Image (cartoon, rainbow, N blue to C red):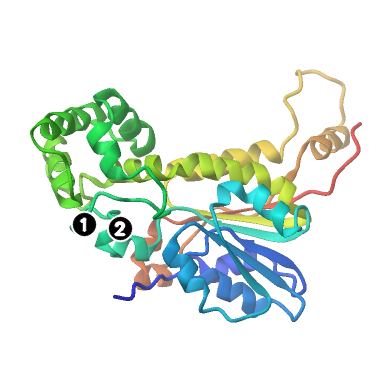
Amino acid sequence: MVFTHVPVLFHETLEALKINAQGIYIDGTFGRGGHSRGILERLGPSGKLYAIDRDLEASKAALQIDDPRFSFVRGTFGNLESIAQNLGILGKVDGLLLDIGVSSPQLDDGQRGFSFDKKGPLDMRMDQEATLSAKEVVNTYSKEELARIFKLYGEERFASKVAGAIVRRREIKPFEDTLDLAQVIEKAIPGKVGPKHKATRCFQALRIEVNHELSELESALKASSLVLNEGGVLCVITFHSLEDRIVKTFIKESSSAPQMPRGLPLTSEQLEKMRLAHATFDKGVGPIKASDSELLENPRARSATLRQAIRLKAQESL
């Protein structure tokens, strides 16, 4: 079965990247190549695009792009600095795109185990060769560990109740498939069934735990200032508040001056120089949300948020 992926905020992202036809770009989350193909269409003959993804299916999809300007690296964007170093493009990149989270093909393929409404093995690995799976997490983590990840990564109000229900049930029979787990979670959470499945937050938390998603994002953001050249553009698309909070905080801290004691006799010009001397990024556009027309075609885009930042030219300290 062929699973398709519709890139979210496609036109908005390409505009935010401010593509230089002769530039060097990195798509850190290739997926099925939607954004990558858009970047390639805007590159000239000497432009270059490097794509990264840890998913084996994504690497297979990358083989369909027969273009000398395109190169694919199987890996994770958390290793962005070392990947750029190995490619010889550290500090030379004009634009970096990170489209964070699970892709539509991963959700739609029940055998990948990401979805609570499709029966499949409890997998959730973005890298099929990784050792940790959702099955191991659900069946071996303590009640306290499960409650922690449900609360921290899923922001689930009833994290402790869900963790307790899982532990009690697995003592009778270990969890094997997604629907079985979703049913136990649904029964453990009080209240009526709403438009949003009760297992949504817990499945998100398990996915983040299995794939170390937030730490990978933090590593990539930290590396972006080393990877991008002066004037290089960072674009990040997130799909839930945890990711967006990390990106928003990073841009704010990277584009502002250090906190100074109140009352110092400094002019606004001196304060701006101090900010530029300290900052590595200038806050760009964002947050950008999907348009009404895009939501009609792709409802999954409703939670997408695009943020942009621009790598500043190095300044001399005051």
Where is residue 166 shown, x and y percent of the image?
Answer: 17, 34
- How far apart marks 1 and 2 lie (CA) works out to 7 Å
Which residue sits furthest left? 172
187 lies left or right of 54: left
Q: Which residue is located at x 30 percent, y 50 percent? A: 123
For marks 1 and 2 on the same chain, the one whose residue lies earlier in the sequence: 2
Establish if 269 lies above or below 63.
above
Amino acid type of the residue tagged 1 in the rendering: Gly
Relative depth, front residue between 182 and 84: 84
Residue 190 visible from this viewpoint: no
Residues packed near mark 2 inside 10 Å, few (<14), some (14 to 19) or many (20 plus): many
Residue 112 - label: 2
Establish if 109 lies above or below 247.
below
Q: Which residue is located at x 38 percent, y 67 percent? A: 295
Where is residue 74 shown, x and y percent of the image?
Answer: 54, 60
Establish if 56 lies above or below 187.
below
Q: Which residue is located at x 26 percent, y 55 percent? A: 115
Secondary structure state at the residue bearing disc 2: helix
Disc 1: which residue: 120
- Label 1 with label 2: CB-CB less than 8 Å: yes
Where is residue 147 shown, x and y percent of the image?
Answer: 28, 28
Where is residue 264 shown, x and y percent of the image?
Answer: 83, 19
Residues packed near mark 1 inside 10 Å, few (<14), some (14 to 19) or many (20 plus): some
Image quadrant in which the N terminus is located:
bottom left
Relative depth, front residue between 163 and 158: 163
Amino acid type of the residue tagged 2 in the rendering: Arg
Q: Which residue is located at x 57 percent, y 58 percent? A: 28
60 lies left or right of 117: right
